[in-house]
Amino acid sequence: MKRLLKGERETKKFSEKVLNSLNGKNVILLFGELGSGKTTFTQGIAEALGIKERITSPTFVLSRIYKIKLDKLGEFDQLTHFDLYRIKTAEEILDLGLKEYLEDTKTLIVIEWPELVDDMIAPEKKLSLKFSYGEDDMRFVEVF
């Protein structure tokens, strides 16, 4: 399914729909080029969970953890946002503690640039999205 997202507002609305449709999954993998909407999508997830902190891509710190203030689903107590753009090997990812986060079902994990970890995560735990560019301020997202 490929969907058109016309700007930031629509991207954030879509992220809330995705959040409400996880059905027991706790990992969201975000594929796509720079500037295609991955961080905006994550901001929408955070807003839907009542997180008031400013969400930025953790490109240089690699991960950020946010306590969830309001989870309407009652499933998660924290959001962990990874940006693996600068990571070159799977070993580096394991050094970040990703394995421990994956074992914690109360943690919602959003991973930008997940190419190196995709195979490490069980299919029943993850939802994958691919963002791409459209004309003007439009973006496309494909759920797979």
Image (cartoon, grey):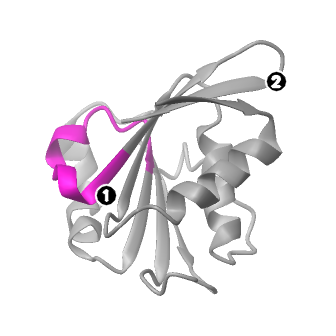
SS of the residue under disc 1: loop
The answer to whether residue 9 is left or right of residue 107 is right
For image coordinates 52% across by 62% down, the residue present is 19
Identity, as a three-letter code, of the amino acid under mark 2: Asp
**Residue 96 - label:** 1
Can you name the residue that lies furthest to the front here? 1
The answer to whether residue 136 is left or right of residue 28 is right
Which residue is at the front of the view, 7 or 91?
7
Rendering quarter of residue 139: top right
Rendered location of residue 3, percent (x, y): 59, 30
Which residue is at the front of the view, 90 or 114?
114
Identity, as a three-letter code, of the amino acid under mark 1: Leu
Which residue is at the front of the view, 54 or 134?
134
Which residue is at the front of the view, 110 or 1?
1
Residue 119 is inside the magenta segment: yes
For image coordinates 75% across by 75% down, the residue present is 52
The answer to whether residue 76 is left or right of residue 118 is right
CA–CA distance between discs 1 and 2? 34 Å
Rendered location of residue 34, percent (x, y): 60, 25
Rendering quarter of residue 72: bottom right
Task: Specify the segment rendered in magenta.
Answer: 111-127
- Relative to 10, is 13 above or below? below
| Residue 56 visible in rendering | no
SS of the residue under disc 2: loop
Rendered location of residue 40, percent (x, y): 69, 45
Point out the tag, 1 or 2, that comes first from the N-terminus: 1
Q: Give the residue number, with chain letter if any, for mark 2.
A: 137
